[in-house]
Image (cartoon, rainbow, N blue to C red):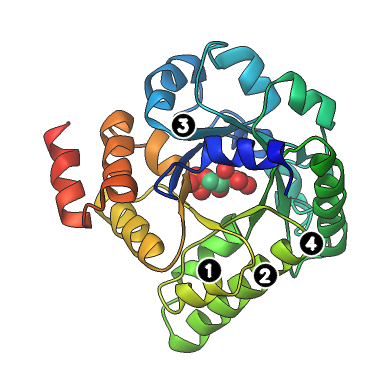
Amino acid sequence: MSWGLKNRLSRIIQKDGRTLMFAVDHGYFLGAITGIKQPKKMLDKIVPYADAVMLTRGMVNSALRYDTSQPIILRADGGPSIAAEKNNSNKLSNHEIMITLEDAVKLNASAVAISIFVGTKHETQTMNNLSRMVSEAEKYGMPVLAVTAVGAELDAMKAQSNKKDKEKFRQYLTLACRMASEHGAHLVKTYYCKEGFSEVTGSCLVPVVMAGGKAGDPLGALKETYEAVKGGAIGVDMGRNIFQSVNPVAMIKSVRSVIHEGYRPNKAFKLYKSLL
Ligand code: 5RP
């Protein structure tokens, strides 16, 4: 690993080995969803509490303060929208690389993010996106975060309650994370699973961060954060549970307390309520 790559990673992963990434890249396929309709003010308020902020180049250019000290993780792929997915299932996975490494360096990015869609029609294409991006990025000392197993279908898989389906979900996450790391990702982002998450993190060759998923009750999100870290994740890359919270600052501070201060979920939830 080159010095530049290690240096960039060290901006994202803190001295305690943990990280709180704030994900705000959703608009690249979902448009102006709740919480990011007017992103500038929201970013001004929340980004200072994050260790890194994940967003698109449009969001960086139009809404992120140029003097921000938080490292940027730049969404580097995309293409289809949620509208395309409605007309033709399997369309949303049709991602292509959308930015060059020069674009990322120009925006002073500390990492780039690429999604892979294991098990879909576009699995080979998106693996190829990841692998090509890793080859390019390594020339610049730029880490690549692979995003796997997030989205509506995966939300549904995650919500399954019977044992067999839970096991299938764990197997899927294990496969997708391992594949991402085999293809050279430096970090992997994936969903949390209740059963066997430590196998998901343990069989991935690089550090794993947990994606938050659909916004839910704050205590639930804090519990998942706690369990994910206990299960070997180095932290989270969380979006909607923060920016769609009734009080995003209270929420991100509480998530921080779990990741960096070892708060148990109930203590972190107490903190959240005290900040409302
Ligand atoms: C979409 C993404 C999002 O950043 C990801 O889903 C994390 O955000 P959330 O916590 O809202 O799920 O990568 O592909």
Distance between the Cα atoms at labels 2 and 3? Answer: 33 Å
> Where 172 falls versus 163 (above or below)?
above
Q: Is residue 217 visible?
A: no
Which residue was labeled with disc 3? 34
Which residue was labeled with disc 1? 201
Is 88 situated left or right of 173 in this image?
right
Which residue was labeled with disc 2? 178
Q: Earlier in the sequence, mark 4 or mark 3?
A: 3
Q: Residues within 10 Å of mark 1 (few under 14, many from 20)?
A: many
Q: Residue furthest front?
A: 3
Q: Is residue 140 visible?
A: yes
> Amino acid under label 3?
Thr
Distance between the Cα atoms at labels 4 and 3? Answer: 34 Å
Q: Earlier in the sequence, mark 1 or mark 2?
A: 2
Disc 3 CB within 8 Å of nearest ligand 1 atom: no
Q: Residue at x 37, y 29 (%)?
A: 49
> Amino acid under label 1?
Thr
Instruction: From the top left corner, tell me how far across and down residue 233 is, in percent.
Output: 46, 60
Q: Residue at x 83, y 25 (%)?
A: 102
Mark 1 lies on a secondary structure that is helix
Q: Earlier in the sequence, mark 3 or mark 1?
A: 3
Task: Give the quadrant of residue 20.
Answer: top left
Query: Which is more foreground, mark 2 or mark 3?
Result: 2
Q: Nearer the viewer, residue 115 or 152?
A: 115
Disc 4 CB within 8 Å of nearest ligand 1 atom: no
> Amino acid under label 4?
His
Q: Residues within 10 Å of mark 2 (few under 14, many from 20)?
A: many
